[in-house]
Image: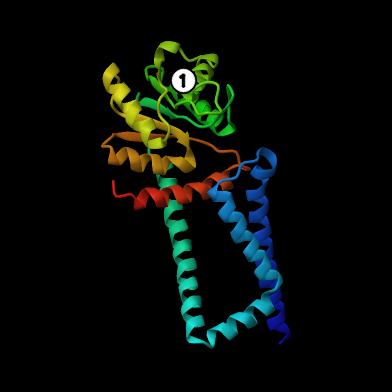
């Protein structure tokens, strides 16, 4: 009995610390930059429930045992269990896909397509800065390669994301003649569609190097593949304190992309 209590106590502590760590990682962007999206909202809810369960595990288990005595309760708990297991499997599968996509090398001198992200006035967000830094590194490594800066202008942005990318690349030593602007897109799909149209119009190399954050490379690649594009990845490394929030959001983005008919 004493051993069982020790094991139960260890499990409760592990679950609580896991939930607390996840909660801290997901709430930091909300506190620091007021970033709230479906990713950290869902994650914060899940972590809160996990901590609640750990704190009140004996009571919760008694209630679950009571529900299991009834046919309806068994159905509900069974469906909940299947849902949780399915969610875990999906997270693992999508994560493996993300890792593989981020390691898909582009061909030499492929046309870099830098996917836009939020701009605050005329100042790039940290995520966009990470993408632009990756683009600078790629263009310096391949001096014969050209680049498409892709991204339109949002209602709260003073310049287009494409213009912001252009300015940053030029400030960091990239020849302006190597940069082409696509400033009409409002989504990842439009980034790729409009950029490839520009590539064809300008007679640029048709193989593309998608420059975006590592967590986003897989979904961008799925879209590019559906468009029939030949592509590789130039992944930008995401800041550790931002990664959990955007990774969690991207899980939903991938599921949405998978569920789309066309």
Q: Quadrant of residue 143?
A: top left
**82, 232: nearer the viewer:** 82
| Left or right for 190, reference 23 | left
> Which residue sits at x=50%, y=29%?
154
Image location of residue 9, percent across then percent down? 71, 74
> Which residue sits at x=37%, y=20%?
145
* Residue 107 seen in the figure: no
> Which residue sits at x=61%, y=58%?
45
- Density class for disc 1 (Cα within 10 Å; few <14, some 14-19, many ≥20) is few
Q: In which quadrant is the N terminus drawn?
A: bottom right
User: Label 1 belongs to which residue?
Assistant: 140
| Left or right for 9, reference 197 | right
Image location of residue 81, percent across then percent down? 49, 72
| Left or right for 234, reference 123 | left
**161, 96: nearer the viewer:** 161
Q: Quadrant of residue 218?
A: top left
Mark 1 secondary-structure assignment: helix
Image location of residue 209, percent across then percent down? 38, 30
> Which residue sits at x=36%, y=51%?
258
Name the image colouring: rainbow
| Left or right for 222, reference 8 | left
* Residue 82 seen in the figure: yes
């Amino acid at each position: 009995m004493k051993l069982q209590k020790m094991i139960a106590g260890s499990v409760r502590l592990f679950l609580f610390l896991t939930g607390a760590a996840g909660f801290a990682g997901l709430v930091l962007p909300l506190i620091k930059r007021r970033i709230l999206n479906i990713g950290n909202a869902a994650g914060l809810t899940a972590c809160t429930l996990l901590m609640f369960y750990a704190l009140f595990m004996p009571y919760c288990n008694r209630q679950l045992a009571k529900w299991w005595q009834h046919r309806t309760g068994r159905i509900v708990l069974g469906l909940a269990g299947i849902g949780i297991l399915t969610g875990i499997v999906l997270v693992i599968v999508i994560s493996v896909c993300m890792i593989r996509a981020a390691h898909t090398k582009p061909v030499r001198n492929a046309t870099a397509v830098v996917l836009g992200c939020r701009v605050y006035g005329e100042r790039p967000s940290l995520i966009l800065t990470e993408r632009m830094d990756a683009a600078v590194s790629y263009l310096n490594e391949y001096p014969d390669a050209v680049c498409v800066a892709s991204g339109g202008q949002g209602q709260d942005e003073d310049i287009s994301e494409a213009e912001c990318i252009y300015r940053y690349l030029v400030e960091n030593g990239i020849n302006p003649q190597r940069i082409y602007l696509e400033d009409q897109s409002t989504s990842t799909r439009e980034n790729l569609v409009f950029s490839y149209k520009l590539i064809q119009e300008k007679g640029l190399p048709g193989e593309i190097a998608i420059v975006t954050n590592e967590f986003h490379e897989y979904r961008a690649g799925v879209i590019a593949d559906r468009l029939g594009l030949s592509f590789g990845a130039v992944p930008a490394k995401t800041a550790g304190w931002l990664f959990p929030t955007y990774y969690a959001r991207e899980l939903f983005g991938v599921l949405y992309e998978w569920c789309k008919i066309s």
